[in-house]
Image (cartoon, helix red, strand yellow):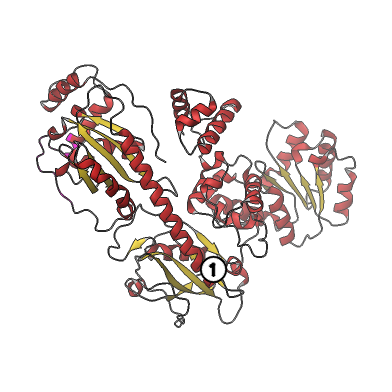
Amino acid sequence: MTTTEESPARPALTPLRQARERFLTGRPLPDGVPDEIVAAWRRARFFGVRHDLAEPSEPRPPARSALLTAARPVLERLAPALASGQSSLVLTDERLRVLWSAGSGPGDEKCHDLSEQEVGHNSAALALRTRRRAEVHGPEHFLDLWQDVSAVSVPVLAPENDQVLGTVTVACGLCTGCTPHPGAALAEATATAVEAELLARSRTTERALLDAFQRAAARPGAAVVALDGKNRLLSDAAAGMLSPGAVAVLERTAAANGSGRDDTDPSEAYGPRERVGASEPTRTSEPYDLSEPARPSEPYDSARHRNSSVAYDLELPDGTGTAHVTPVRHEGAVIGVVAVVEPPADEAVRPHAQHPRVALAGRSVPWRHATAKAAELARSREPLLLTGERGTGKTALARELLRARGDLDPVVVDAAEGPVDEPGIWATALASNHALLLRHAERLAQADVAALNSLLDERPDAPLLLTFTPGTPPGPCLQRLLDTLAARSVTLPALRERPDDIRELLPELAPKPVPGRPPLTWTLDALRALERHPWPGNITELAHLVRALAEHRQVAGPVRRTELPDLVREGPATRQLSPMELAERTAILESLRRHGGNKARAAAALGIARATLYRKLRGYSL
C-alpha cells in the first residue's frame, strides 16, 4: 500500500509566479515563499537545468522492466479513458525514467526523464524522495513549459520490502485552489493496482521456487538449498552440512544468476535486490532440470558461466563439498537457483561445518571478541565473571565454557530462586573439585555475598563462574565482589549491538522440525525487520518469537515480515515512547492491519478523526 497524507494548504500561485520570475532574474525574493520550493529551484539551478528547456533529453528507457510488465495490464485498461480528456498518466521507474505514458496532458509528451537533474522540481521526484503522495502546481515547477500544469504522483512500492520501484503521475491543466489534486484518487488507485499485480507475480515465483526445491529434496537425505535473493530454503541435511560461509557463497551465486531477470535484457529488473556480498554477473538460460548429470567438480569460473545455458558445479568453502547449481526459470525469466550439495568423497559431513550451538553462534566482531576473551580466561580454573543485559546468553556461554574445559558436572546455584540458605554448599562443591556456576549474582542476599567474598579470600583460584546483570547500584559487599573479579570479567554485547548474528541464531533457536514439515525459513524482508528491532529482551526475546512462530503459524513457506509482531514488523520508533504511547501505537498498527492500510476506516474504528490519525502517524514515524 502506498502512504498518503492530506495535502497542506498551498501558497497562492500568483505571488509564487512573481517570486519565480524574481528568482530567475537574480532579484531578491519576497517574504512568504516556502523554503522547500526555493530549495527545489536552487537544486535545479545547481544541476544546470534550463528553465526555458524546449527539448528535454530523451534517454532510452529500459528494453525490459519487470515493473512495466506487471503494470501494463493495469495501465492499458485505463488508457482509453484518458484519450478523450485533458489529463495524462505516466509511469516511471525508480530512476524516474518514463516507462509508459498515455493521455494528453500539457508538456508530458516531450519528457522522457523526470529526475530533478533533467527537468528540475516535479511531483514524481518529490514523491520518490518523500515516499508519499506529492503534488506540484504551476510556478512551483522550474520549467517554463510546466507553468500551467498541476501534477500529482504516488510512489509504487515493492510488495516484499516496501522499496520504491517507481511512481505513477497524473498531470492536467493548472488547478487553482484545488486540494487535493483532482487526479489524486486515480493515481492512488493505479499505484495500488500495480502493487497488487506485483504481489501476485511475486507469490507465483515463490511457488515455482518451492516446487523446484521439493522436487530436488524428494530423495531421502538430499542436501538441497533453493535461493532467489529474497528467500532461502534448506533441507535438514543441508542445514546440518553447510557452514555460514558456504551459504553466503550460494547466496552470491543466486544473485549472480540474475534472480528475477529476463534473458532478453539482463540489465534491468524491478528494484535492486539486496545481495549477501559482491558477486560477478553470471547468466544461464536452461530450465530447471534435475535429470541432467553433474559434471566433474571444478572451481567456479564466472567468465565461463556468464553465458552458460546449463547447470554447473561449484566448490564450496570450509571443505563443505560440491554444489550442483541449477537455475530455476519461470515465465521466461531466471528467478533463482537450486543447489544439491554433495559432501567430500572421503567423509560424509565435516565436523567443523556443523552449525554452532546457540552459545557460540555469531560471527560479528563484538561477539567474537567477547567469546574469544571468555574462552581464553576460562582455560584456567580460576573465577570468571560474565556480565551483560538480561537475555544476552551469559548462562548458556558459561555452560559451554565449562563443557569445553571438561567440567561436565558443575554445581549450579541460582540466586534468583531465593536466598541461598546454605552457603556452605559452595565450599563443599569446591572441596570436591567441582566447578561452581552461580547465576544472577546481583540477586544474592548480603549475607551470601559476604560468605562468597570470604571464600574467595581463602581460595582466590576457585573454579567459580558467575553471571551478573547490571541494574540498581550494588551495595558495598557486592561491589567488593565485582571489584575482586574485575580483572577476570567479560561483558557480553546486547543483541542490538550484533544484529549480523541474528541469521545464525535463528536456526539454532528454532525447535526441531516436526516430521513432514520443513524447517523454519525466513524471507529477506523478515530478516531485515528482525535485524532492525532493538530486542530489549535480547536472545531470550528472540527465542520466544521463533518458538511461537514455529508452533502456531498456519501457512507454509518462509516467514514473511507480515507475520512478525507489530513492534518488530514496523521497526523501532524514532524516539523513546511512554507506556501509554506504546499502547496507542500498537492499537493504531493493529487497526491499520485489520483494515488493509485504509486510514479512514482505521480512524473510524478507533473513534478518532482522520486528521488526528494522520498526526499520530507522523508523531510515531509510521
Residue at the top extreme? 31
**Residue 273 location, x and y as percent?**
39, 54
Which residue occupies 51% across, 46% down?
A: 529
Figure check: 492 above or below 149: below
Figure check: 389 above or below 526: above
Can I make out residue 42 in this image?
no
Which residue occupies 17% across, 34% down?
A: 45
**Residue 487 location, x and y as percent?**
67, 45
Foreground pick, 406 / 332: 332
Q: In which quarter of the image is the N terminus?
A: top left
User: Residue 477, located in which quarter of the rendered image?
Assistant: top right
Q: What residue type is labelled 1?
A: Gln
Figure check: 536 above or below 329: above
Mark 1 lies on a secondary structure that is helix
The main secondary structure of the magenta stretch is: loop
Start-end of magenta stretch: 45-59
**Residue 437 location, x and y as percent?**
78, 50
Foreground pick, 19 / 345: 19
**Residue 467 location, x and y as percent?**
72, 45
Q: In this view, does 73 lie to the left or right of 291?
A: left
Q: In this view, does 469 lie to the left or right of 274?
A: right
User: Residue 584, located in which quarter of the rendered image?
Assistant: top right
The residue beneath circle 1 is: 214
Neighbour tally class for label 1: few under 14, some 14-19, many 20 plus, Cα within 10 Å = some
Foreground pick, 423 / 524: 524
Q: Is residue 378 left or right of residue 129?
A: right
Does the magenta segment cover residue 444?
no
Which residue occupies 87% across, 52% down?
A: 429
Can I make out residue 532 in this image?
yes
